[in-house]
């Protein structure tokens, strides 16, 4: 009986040893210059929302935004199309469900001009509001698609 207990305790304690199998080495943050964003849409807040979303995606991926000549990469964004339309109405016949679709091209070049990453992102989302404040809800719908765009930029930047 003692042999069984001793054998069981040996197997238990031998299996609980602290051994490092994979060592995680954090990579050095890369410096990226967000050159410009091109939008062919007259919506006034759209440029600000997408610029902030793309910048946040770069920063949250662990990289740095700097355009002082020390950058390793240049990032260019182009909003090819934006569709925004109401798809649902409240009982008072005001739009309260909006659909937003965006088509974005992200291009990352090294400082020599070689294209490192060239991605086309197409996203669609819905925003449900109260139907009382149309201008605010339109902005919130754009911010919702901006949050999705931020996640996409985060995943693209992790490929560098």
Image (cartoon, grey):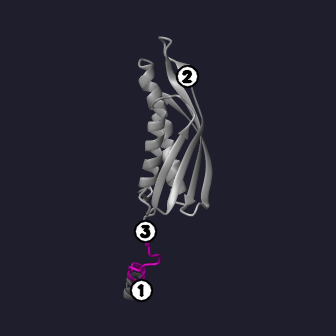
Cα distance in 3D space between marks 1 and 3 = 47 Å
- Dot 1: what SS? helix
Mark 1 or mark 2, which is nearer the start of the sequence? 1
Q: How far, Cα to Cα, is label 3 from label 2?
A: 45 Å
Q: Residue at x 45, y 20 (%)?
A: 134
Residue 125 locus on image (x, y percent): 55, 35
Residue 159's quadrant in the figure? bottom right
- Identify the residue position indicated by label 1 in the image: 7
Local packing at callout 3 (Cα closer than 10 Å; few below 14, some 14-19, many 20+) is few
Q: Given the current orientation, which residue lies at the most extreme top position?
A: 92
Range shown magenta: 11-27
* Of labels 1 and 3, the one closer to you: 3
Q: Is residue 37 left or right of residue 68?
A: right
* Residue 50 x, y percent position in the rendering: 48, 40
Q: Is residue 119 magenta?
A: no
Q: Earlier in the sequence, mark 3 or mark 2?
A: 3
Q: Nearer the viewer, mark 2 or mark 1?
A: 2
Residues 154 and 35: in front is 35
Q: Which residue is mark 3?
A: 28
- Residue placed at 46% from the left, 61% from the top? 71
Residue with the mark numbered 2: 86
């Amino acid at each position: 009986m003692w042999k069984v207990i001793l054998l069981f305790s040996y197997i238990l304690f031998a299996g609980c040893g602290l051994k490092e199998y994979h060592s995680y080495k954090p990579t050095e943050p890369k410096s990226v210059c967000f050159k410009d964003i091109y939008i062919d849409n007259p919506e006034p807040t759209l440029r600000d929302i997408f610029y902030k979303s793309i910048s946040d995606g770069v920063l949250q991926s662990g990289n740095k935004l700097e355009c002082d000549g020390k950058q390793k990469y240049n990032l260019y964004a182009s909003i090819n199309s934006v569709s925004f339309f109401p798809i649902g109405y409240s009982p008072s016949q005001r739009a309260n469900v909006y659909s937003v679709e965006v088509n974005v091209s992200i291009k990352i070049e090294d400082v020599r001009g070689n294209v490192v990453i060239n991605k086309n992102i197409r996203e669609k989302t819905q925003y449900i509001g109260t139907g009382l404040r149309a201008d605010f809800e339109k902005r919130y719908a754009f911010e919702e698609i901006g949050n999705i765009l931020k996640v996409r930029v985060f995943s693209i930047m992790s490929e560098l």
